Image: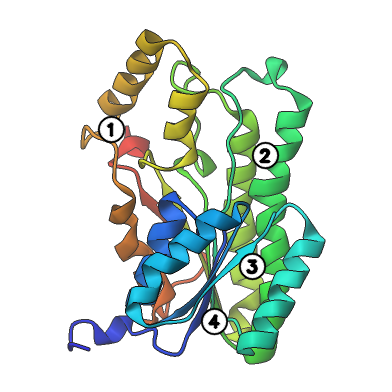
Amino acid sequence: MSEIRKPYDLNGKVAIVTGGGSGLGREFCDVLAEFGADVICPDLFLERAEETCKIIKKYGRKAVPISLDVARYEQVQQLFKQVMTEFGKVDILVNNAGVAPPSVLIDETDLNDWHRVIDVDLHGVFYCMKEALGIMKKQKGGVIINISSTLGISAHQPSILAQSPYVAAKHGVVGLTRQAAAEYGPYGIRVNCIAPGFHRGTRLPDSLHTQITDDEERKKRGDLIIEGTPLRRIAEPKELRGILLLLASDNSSFMTGSVVVSDGGMTIC
């Protein structure tokens, strides 16, 4: 490994990336394996997890696909039991799994959509953190990286998207990140958060395509997003690889409780 890459060396580390079967999760699995980590890839869709593992095995690291619904605590418990049986430790947890609801105002929000988003995007993060922190506390060290959103620190005008369950959940993820950092710093555990803006393959851009069927309306909303972003574009998933690697490695050894925003400048406007 070159001198430039050495501070990012993850050789011998064991990483879990929830929702690693596609989009940002696949990028996160890939970069962690590239820099030496063995990667467990739990995903609601096992076939997607298997595809990710095929891709990252080119680095010669262990890659384990697992079927998981993070909203079901018993499944989360079983995941961590399996990882501890096979690897004996958990060094890095990336809480990436998430879903997004239809774009509707609060009074029009379906209660089933509300509960599903909160169950996956907030409860799922809590469940995984609960299990990982217990293990890391005994290890006296570990790294947790939660994936929130710019909607975890702000809100959108409904002319772009109105997704109150998602906003509530992602704000909760930021709060959990900061509280966990405060509680577990004395154990040598670092807990940080990434707040992406509009990246291709994330839930919110997908919402524009799958939930807004009118082509003209979809284009209008997409244009509003780009106009409100100083860099005037939507990002690619690979543009978060460096941030994830920084937070996972010892190069961020004095960072905890931080929320790293990558949004093209959207939240400064």
Q: Residue at x 73, y 22 (%)?
A: 110
Residue 8 lies in what quarter of the image?
bottom left
The disc label shown at residue 180, or none: 3
Q: Which circle's residue, 3 or 1, is located before the other in the chain? A: 3
**Amino acid bearing label 1:** Thr
Q: Which residue is mark 1?
A: 229
Q: Secondary structure at mark 2?
A: helix
Q: Residue at x 55, y 55 (%)?
A: 47
Q: Which residue is mark 4?
A: 91
Q: Is residue 269 above or below residue 62?
A: above
Q: Residue at x 59, y 81 (%)?
A: 90
- What is the C-alpha distance between the residues marked 4 and 3? 16 Å
Q: Secondary structure at mark 1?
A: loop
| Label 1 Cα crowd, 10 Å radius (few <14 / some 14-19 / many 20+) | many
The answer to whether residue 85 is left or right of residue 207 is: right
Q: Which circle's residue, 1 or 2, is located before the other in the chain? A: 2
Tag 4 and tag 1, C-beta contact below 8 Å: no
**Amino acid bearing label 2:** Val
Q: Which residue is mark 2?
A: 117
The answer to whether residue 111 is left or right of residue 52 is: right
Q: Quadrant of the C terminus?
A: top left
